[in-house]
Amino acid sequence: MRELKDITSIDDIRILVDTFYGKIREDDLLKDIFNNVIQDRWPQHLEKMYRFWQTVLFDEHTYFGAPFVPHAQLPVEKLHFDRWVSLFNETVDHFFSGEKATRAKWQGNRMAEMFLMKIQYYKNNASTPLQ
C-alpha cells in the first residue's frame, strides 16, 4: 500500500477537485443535476472550486462569493447529499491523508448538512436566500 501525503498545495486541490467532479459527472444519481445546471461551464466551475478549497484549507482568500445561493433551487434531497459526501470522502481518502485531508472531509460533510437544511427550509417557506 502506498503512503499518502496530506493536501499541501493548489496542485493537490486540483487533483482532488478534478477527480471528484469527474466522478460526479459519471454518477447515475448526480450527473444530470450537475450537468443540467453547469452545462458547458465546467472549466469555470472547477476553477471556482479550486479557489473555494484553497480558501477553506489554506486560509488563502481567493474565493469570494456566497456558496449556498447557486444551490438553493436544486432538485436535491438527503440521498443526493449522502452520495456527494460519499464520493468526496472516497476521493480524498484515495489521494490524501493528514490534517488538511481530514479537514476537507469534515468541511464537505458540514457543508452538505447545512445546504440540505437550508434547501429544505426554502422549499417549505416563501422566502429566498440572500445573495
Image (tube, helix red, strand yellow):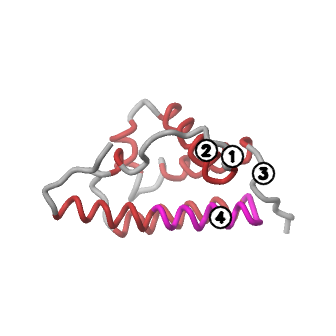
Q: Quadrant of residue 113?
A: bottom left
Q: Measuring 61% from the left and 44% from the top, which residue is drawn there?
A: 18
Is the stretch drawn in magenta largely helix, strand or loop? helix
Residue in front for this viewpoint, 69 or 85? 69
Decide: few, some or many residues near mark 1? Use Cα within 10 Å; few <14, some 14-19, many ≥20: some
10 Å neighbourhood of mark 3: few (<14), some, or many (≥20)? some
- Residue 103 image offset from top left, x and y in percent: 65, 64
Which range of residues does the magenta coloring cover? 95-111
Q: Which residue is mark 3?
A: 8
The N terminus, quarter of image: bottom right
The answer for how far apart the CA atoms under marks 2 and 1 are is: 5 Å
Res. 103 mark? 4
Q: Residue at x 38, y 51 (%)?
A: 68
Structural distance between the alpha carbons of marks 2 and 4 = 18 Å
Task: From the viewer's side, name the closer residue of 14 and 100.
Answer: 100
Residue 80 image point, x, y percent: 38, 63
